[in-house]
Image (cartoon, rainbow, N blue to C red):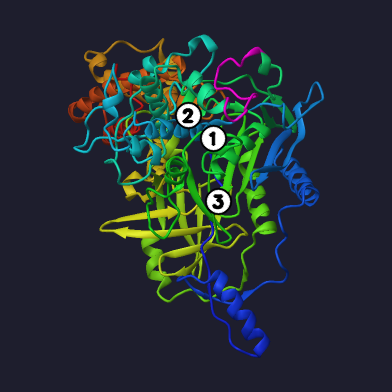
């Protein structure tokens, strides 16, 4: 569902000056293993890689990494499984599933919520139906929808393949994906037509990750198979794979509910237990499973559908599922049918990660050496921990040659001027107030930090430091394997991050940047506060003079603009304070998964203020004819009217006015 991912590396080209026959022979050996058409670099390797195959050595290595990650990222517990050549090398639990009861994690018993790793089962189910001839990957999804249709925003229909590669072009949104109580859950057939997202990209043009698309695919499984999604997965995947501790059902069956790990948040030096998360988009993120069960799924995928004496896919179908079917840039990893590709330390991986508000999980496969890694954490600190674990695992068992730094190519300054700026992800919302969370509160910025170096902020929990290795091609310099490519398309600048093939980033024009809009809102707020202070001063003076004042002819007419302006300014200050409190709230149902009553009230106040602002604009012309107003008061009132208009327009841009 909502997630971060490990990092992918750019293959390295090398050249080395011949100093001796011994060095020359080493150079040829490394050349055969590591050459690529990117950049000349000096290559060294201090020691051969550790061979993955000794369970005891593997456990010793993981004990060190996992212990460190749990401590550094404030995670109570984790579960992990490693497979190779069709067998489980290690499955083990770390830390606690229940801190209060002192219950430790057990890899074969403790159940974790897996978030978007669930999608791999949904996509596998689709491929089973494709194999049976019941689903056509290139057919319009509307062919399989009996009670509603996806609107034809573009001439091209959305196909099943678009769903599997996240190229349907849907905007993203989280309203209704999580519900506060189990009884609030609706069947997919009832929920999906009420939450059809806007289509903001033509199908097949660019990746834009979509939970709705995965839920829609799960609903198609129901429609085609004639059974519920949960039952289909149980019969066609869990049972043949021996996954007895896995379910998509909510609440969990009685046999599993007692084995579920608690999910935790960490704040103020303490862990806080979260409640069970009731996920509406079941096929996109409701899987609960153990590390041992997930090892069975990994074995079946790496054995191209085979597991023991049974099959979940034919070999040709599994091969087709694991092949690349879309990429934003041919030089970078892309999307298979469900898996996303990675390139780490020169090795090809496919996998998926997933998170809920309390759990984080990661599944990665190395098809060539038949190796799989699965890990799940019971705290959202697992986002960073999983990246560190995967990179440490690859560096230890499948390391890339060490490289020395190279001189960045000429002309960097000119390219940097075109690159620098604020970007927004293709995984965004454009038609509802959730645009605030995706774009205003989560900006992605790219800035130059020296000769040939860039810094990306806002993608993941840490800054990404890059160095240019070829014009427009950058590589990470902070220990992670990843490549970033910038691509100019006419007046647009696109950014593709190698370890995030399921979305792209597009540079914003200045009028769309968070800095511009925040600046406008702060200027308006200062003026509104000034108006409110002047109103307070006016009232205090009026109270002091009340006994001596006599009503004047036309006083009401001349005072009405002031009262109207004061009302608008006060409402706008209240709206800004309310929005700040709501969007910074820890309550997931304040704005993230629901439009809370408080948000509706704030948006209604904003709408009332917008209507009253029309009156302020009207009076901004009339006050110039009122003798009781001096020049400075009139000018100030004009600025107040202008601020009110700008404020209402900005709220409209972010869809924060209540329009029933």
Q: Measure the alpha-carbon separation of dots 3 and 2.
A: 24 Å
Callout 2: SS: helix
Callout 1: SS: helix
Q: Give the label on residue 547, or none.
A: none
Disc 3: which residue: 367
Compared to residue 395, the image places residue 101 above or below, namely: above
Callout 3: SS: loop
Location of residue 214 (image quadrant)? top left
In-front residue for pair 199/44: 44
Q: Measure the alpha-carbon separation of dots 1 and 2.
A: 8 Å
Q: Which residues are magenta?
A: 239-254
Q: Measure the alpha-carbon separation of dots 1 and 3.
A: 18 Å
Q: Residues within 10 Å of mark 2 (few under 14, many from 20)?
A: many
273 sits left or right of 425 in the view: right
In the rendered image, residue 246 lying in the magenta stretch gets the answer yes
Residue occupying the point 64% across, 80% down: 26
> Residue lying farthest front?
309
Give the quadrant of the C terminus.
top left
Give yes or no for contact between labels 3 and 2 (Cβ–Cβ under 8 Å). no
Compared to residue 501, the image places residue 609 above or below, namely: above
Residue occupying the point 50% across, 35% down: 120
Task: Compare marks 1 and 3 and give the one earlier in the sequence.
Answer: 1
Residue 138 percent across, percent down from the top left = 29, 38
Residue 264 percent across, percent down from the top left = 68, 28
Disc 2: which residue: 284
Disc 1: which residue: 117
Residue occupying the point 34% across, 46% down: 206
Residue 572 percent across, percent down from the top left = 39, 26
Q: Nearer the viewer, mark 1 or mark 3?
A: 3
Task: Compare marks 3 and 2 and give the one earlier in the sequence.
Answer: 2
């Amino acid at each position: 569902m909502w997630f971060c991912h490990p990092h992918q590396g750019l293959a390295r080209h090398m050249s080395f000056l011949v100093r001796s026959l011994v060095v020359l022979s080493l150079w040829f050996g490394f050349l055969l293993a590591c050459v690529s058409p990117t950049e000349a670099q000096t290559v060294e390797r201090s020691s051969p890689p550790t061979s993955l195959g000794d369970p005891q050595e593997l456990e010793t290595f993981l004990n060190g990494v996992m212990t460190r990650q749990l401590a550094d990222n404030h995670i109570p517990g984790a579960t992990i499984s490693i497979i190779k050549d069709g067998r489980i090398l290690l499955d083990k639990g770390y830390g606690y599933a229940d801190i209060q009861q002192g219950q430790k994690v057990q890899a074969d018993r403790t159940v974790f919520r897996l978030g978007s790793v669930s999608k791999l089962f949904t996509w596998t189910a689709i491929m089973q139906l494709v194999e049976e001839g019941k689903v056509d990957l290139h057919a319009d999804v509307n062919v399989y929808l009996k009670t509603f249709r996806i609107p034809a925003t573009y001439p091209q229909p959305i196909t099943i393949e678009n769903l599997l590669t996240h190229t349907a072009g849907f905007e993203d949104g989280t309203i209704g994906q999580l519900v506060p109580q189990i009884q609030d859950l609706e069947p997919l057939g009832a929920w999906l037509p009420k939450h059809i997202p806007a289509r903001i990209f033509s199908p097949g043009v660019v990746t834009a990750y979509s939970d709705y698309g995965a839920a829609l695919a799960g609903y198609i499984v129901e429609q085609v198979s004639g059974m519920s999604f949960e039952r289909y997965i149980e019969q066609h995947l869990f049972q043949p794979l021996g996954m007895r501790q896995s379910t998509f059902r909510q609440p969990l069956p009685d046999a599993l509910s007692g084995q579920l790990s608690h999910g935790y948040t960490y704040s103020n030096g303490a862990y806080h237990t979260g409640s069970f998360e009731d996920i509406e988009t079941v096929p996109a993120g409701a899987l609960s499973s153990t590390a041992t069960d997930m090892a069975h799924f990994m074995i079946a995928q790496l054995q191209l559908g085979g597991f023991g004496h049974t099959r979940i896919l034919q070999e040709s179908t599994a091969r087709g599922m694991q092949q690349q079917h879309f990429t934003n840039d041919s030089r970078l990893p892309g999307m298979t049918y469900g898996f996303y590709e990675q390139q780490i330390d020169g090795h090809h991986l496919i996998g998926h990660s997933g998170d809920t508000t309390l759990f984080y999980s990661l599944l990665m496969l190395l098809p060539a050496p038949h190796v799989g890694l699965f890990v799940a954490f019971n705290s959202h600190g697992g986002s960073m921990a999983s990246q560190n674990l995967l990179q440490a695992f690859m560096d230890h068992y499948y390391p890339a040659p060490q490289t020395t730094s190279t001189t960045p190519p000429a002309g960097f300054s000119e390219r940097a001027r075109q690159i620098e700026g604020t970007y927004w992800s293709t995984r965004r919302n454009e038609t509802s107030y959730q645009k605030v969370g995706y774009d205003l509160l989560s900006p992605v910025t790219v800035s130059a930090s020296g000769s040939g170096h860039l810094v990306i902020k806002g993608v993941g929990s840490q800054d990404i430091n890059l160095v240019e290795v070829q014009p427009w091609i950058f590589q990470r310099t902070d220990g992670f394997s990843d490549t970033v490519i910038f691509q100019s398309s006419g007046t647009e600048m696109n950014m593709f991050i190698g370890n995030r093939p399921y979305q792209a980033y597009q540079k914003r024009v200045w009028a769309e940047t968070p800095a511009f809009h925040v600046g406008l809102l702060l200027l308006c707020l200062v003026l509104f506060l000034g108006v409110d202070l002047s109103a307070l001063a006016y009232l205090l003076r009026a109270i002091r003079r009340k006994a001596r004042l006599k009503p004047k002819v036309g006083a009401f007419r001349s005072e009405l603009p002031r009262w109207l302006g004061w009302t608008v300014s006060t409402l706008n200050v209240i709206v800004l304070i309310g929005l700040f409190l709501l969007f910074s709230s820890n309550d997931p149902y304040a704005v993230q998964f629901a439009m809370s009553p408080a948000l509706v009230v704030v948006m209604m106040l904003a709408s009332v203020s917008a209507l009253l602002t029309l009156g302020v604009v009207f009076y901004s012309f009339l006050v110039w004819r009122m003798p009781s107003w001096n020049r400075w008061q009139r000018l100030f009132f004009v600025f107040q009217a202008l601020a009110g208009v700008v404020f209402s327009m900005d709220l409209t841009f972010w869809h924060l006015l209540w329009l029933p």
